[in-house]
Image (cartoon, grey):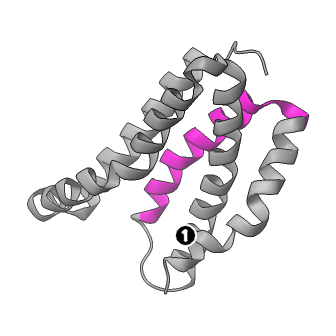
Amino acid sequence: MSLSIIFSSGLWAGPVGGWISDRIGSTRVIIVTGVLSGLVIFALKEVSLGWRLWIVLWIIGIIQAIRFPVTEVFIMSQSPARNRSTIYGIYYSTMQYTGAIFAPIMGGFIDRFGYTTMFNIAAWAVTLLAIATAIFIRDAKD
């Protein structure tokens, strides 16, 4: 039931994210939500069941609901029409389905190294990947 909180923000956060993107540009929204994704993982490991966990899950949902449609529009604006289907196929498979691979791997590492250690590694990895992505897309035309 707690995980449904993540999806509750999708009803309004996606359109709000689109509106923000129209005002400040998709690259800025992608960069900010990417960095926030990593930072919120640091927060996730600090909370336990209760209202603080629900707030962090709600923030995760907001970040995802904003980032996904803005990223899709960014991909559409940056890629030639003849390659779009292939690019979207790669995007969706990496964004949606790699969890099937990484969830059991991460679970095994959590069993071996502990929850805090692995969530620290995940948070740093996501944050650093977002910064690296920001370096590559910061000059993209919106």
Please check the rendered image and state whether residue 73 is part of the magenta-colored stretch, yes or no. Answer: no
Magenta stretch mostly in which secondary structure?
helix
Instruction: State which region is magenta.
Output: 23-44
Which residue is at 55% across, 31% downward? 85
Q: What percent of the width, then of the height, locates residue 74?
A: 69, 30
Which residue is at 66% across, 74% downward? 8
Asked if residue 1 is positioned above or below residue 111 in the image, the reply reads below
Q: What percent of the width, then of the height, locates residue 78?
A: 67, 19
Query: Is 17 left or right of 76, judged from the image as shown?
Result: right
Where is mark 1, residue-wise? Answer: 57
Q: Which residue is farthest left?
A: 112
Q: What percent of the width, then of the height, locates residue 98?
A: 33, 48
Decide if residue 14 is in sight here: yes
Query: Is 117 left or right of 131, judged from the image as shown?
Result: left
Which residue is at 60% across, 63% downward? 61
| Circle 1 residues within 10 Å: few <14, some 14–19, many ≥20 | many
Q: Nearer the viewer, residue 88 or 5?
A: 88
